[in-house]
Amino acid sequence: MSAPGNLVTRNAVSALSLAALFLCGPATAGGSAPPDRGSDPTAVSQAIPAQGEQRRFSFSPDPFDQCKYFMITETSTDWVWMKVEDGFDQYIFTNSLGLMDNLDAHRAVGGSIDLRLARGHLSCAPALRYRQWFTRDQSVDLSVGYVSNHESDLFSYSPRLAGPIVNARFNLTNYLYVQGGLCRFEGPWYLNNYLIPSGARFRTYGGIGLGGVPGVSLWGVEAVGLVLLALAFSGMS
């Protein structure tokens, strides 16, 4: 081949080599191509903070994915299956304060102090509790408590709660529940002006209650009612 032809060929090869270096330079000159973050799921997860992190403590009855411990703040009214002369004696009014530990997504255990007013007697009973979660809002509670028979009296000569109390509850939501159970009364029984010998009797009961913030709100209503009742009695004396 002639000299001019060789010169043209060499110039063409040099031009192609420069073009190849220019096109492939980012992948070869630096050693490797930059990573594609769009194809790396770990990079995306690190860039976005975790959502719905579990809290250590909650004042409302929340499940495991929301909190580890939660408060018990409840108010309930129950109707007792028994014969009474005063319709007010047919009911048990209960306020409960306690703490529960979410063991996992399905179970929680804890305890409470239950303040009850029944047949004119005020009692304070400790209770052990177990909760089985079904959904984030619905669950079943089982509790066992014990009422000492040395409690304060508002009225004399009437049966009082004493001994074990067993309760089963279905939580329709985290704030509303229905319940039923078995309780024990003991003491003198007066019915139609006749004295029934002292003894212990078990009775069934059922009712409805509120928990969480609604339960605490009812505590406030009760406190205002007691103050007004005390003022009314003081005005009569």
Image: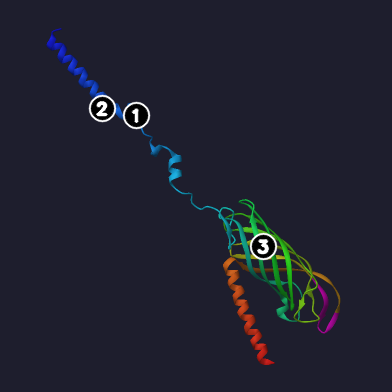
The verdict on residue 112 being magenta is no
Q: Residues within 10 Å of mark 2 (few under 14, many from 20)?
A: few
Q: Amino acid at mark 2?
A: Phe
Look at discs 2 and 1 and give the one toward the viewer. 1
Three-letter code, disc 3: Arg
Residues rendered magenta in the picture: 185-195
For the point 62% across and 81% down, which residue is it?
A: 225
Residue 83 in view in this figure: no
Identify the residue at the far top of this view: 1
Q: Where residue 107 sits in the image (x, y, percent)?
A: 65, 53
In the rendered structure, find residue 30 and report the number of the disc placed on it: 1
Answer with the quarter of the image where residue 182 lies: bottom right
Tell whether 204 sits left or right of 65: right
As drawn, which residue projects farthest toward the right? 197
On-image quarter of the N terminus: top left
Count of numbered badges drawn on the protein: 3
Main SS, magenta region, reads strand
Secondary structure category for the residue under label 2: helix
N-term-proximal mark, 3 vs 2: 2
Q: CA distance from mark 2 to mark 1?
A: 13 Å
Furthest-front residue in view? Answer: 30
Residue 187 colored in magenta in the image: yes
Quarter of the image for residue 17 reads: top left
Disc number lying in front (1 or 3): 1
On the rendered image, what quadrant is the C terminus found in? Answer: bottom right
- Amino acid type of the residue that numbered disc 1 sits on in the rendered structure: Gly
Name the residue rendered at 43%, 43% in the picture.
Answer: 44
Q: Name the residue beneath numbered marker 3.
A: 169
- Can residue 196 be seen here? The reply is yes
